[in-house]
Image: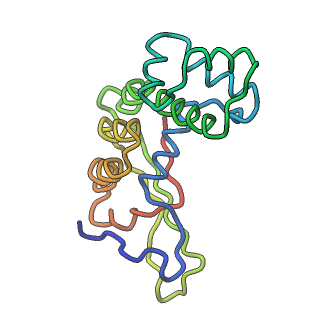
Amino acid sequence: MPERNIDFGKFGARGVKGHEAAARQLDALAGFVATPITQRRGLLARLHYLTRTDRARQAAREAGLTVTDRTLKAWLDGRRSPSGKNLQAIETAYRTVRRHNVARYLTARLNREGRGTRVEFHPLNQSQVTRPHQRVVSFRTLNVRHWDRIVEAWANDDEDALDDAWTNDATVDLGSEWGQYEYVTNVGFAA
């Protein structure tokens, strides 16, 4: 694809890929449990979310939480504590299940019945780049109307598909300068 940065940061520019910034924003909109999993309250919140219904338990198993019901009950009752490996499995399963549960809602919220959502592109940080190597990039806004592929790739945690969807459904509409917004300092949604 033309205008893709091959050697980003060579002259000191700093930023993150646009799709990574969009994923962070979608994570913020998803409303994950804020309490860390290492605290009892955070662990219980995640376990209750993953075990409150049979459908949630099945989704947790599909997401990689493969412990017995007896072990889950012991964790919930506080008789045993999960190991570090199991804490990571719980966190991964929780995030995966939560993303899938809110994906349809986020798609509808961002599409807004075809009106779309305004997205702010904050350009990359060039404060460490020498003057002759700096690009002229500015703050831009764009109304993105098609969020289906973006949210689906985010929900599936597929970084390549998210990069492709973000580029083809969002940044390419910036016109001939779209390649300058492959890396950004931040992406904001008016959602």
Position above or below: 176 against 12:
above
Q: Is residue 37 left or right of residue 23?
A: right
Residue at image position (29%, 39%) is 149
Q: In which quarter of the image is residue 68?
A: top right
Camera-side residue: 48 or 182? Answer: 48
- Name the residue furthest left: 1
Q: Image point 33% across, 49% down: which residue? A: 170
Q: Is residue 97 shown above or below 174?
A: above
Q: Which of 97 and 25 is in front in this view?
A: 97
Q: Where is residue 69 in the image (x, y as percent from the top left)?
A: 56, 15
Q: Name the image quarter holding the N terminus.
A: bottom left
113 in relation to 161, above or below: above
| Residue at far bottom of view | 132
Q: Is residue 107 left or right of 54 when viewed as pictured? A: left
In front of the other: 191 or 91: 91
So how many labels did they put on this image? 0
Residue 47 lies, in percent from the top left, at 61, 22
Q: Could you tell me which residue is drawn at 46 percent across and 52 percent down?
A: 20
Where is 117 relative to 119, above or below? above
- Residue 38: give x, y in percent of width and height: 73, 36
Please state if 48 lies on the left or on the right of 149 as rendered. Answer: right
Residue 46 placement (x, y as % from top left):
62, 25
Q: Which residue is drawn at 41% across and 27% down?
A: 62
Figure colour scheme? rainbow
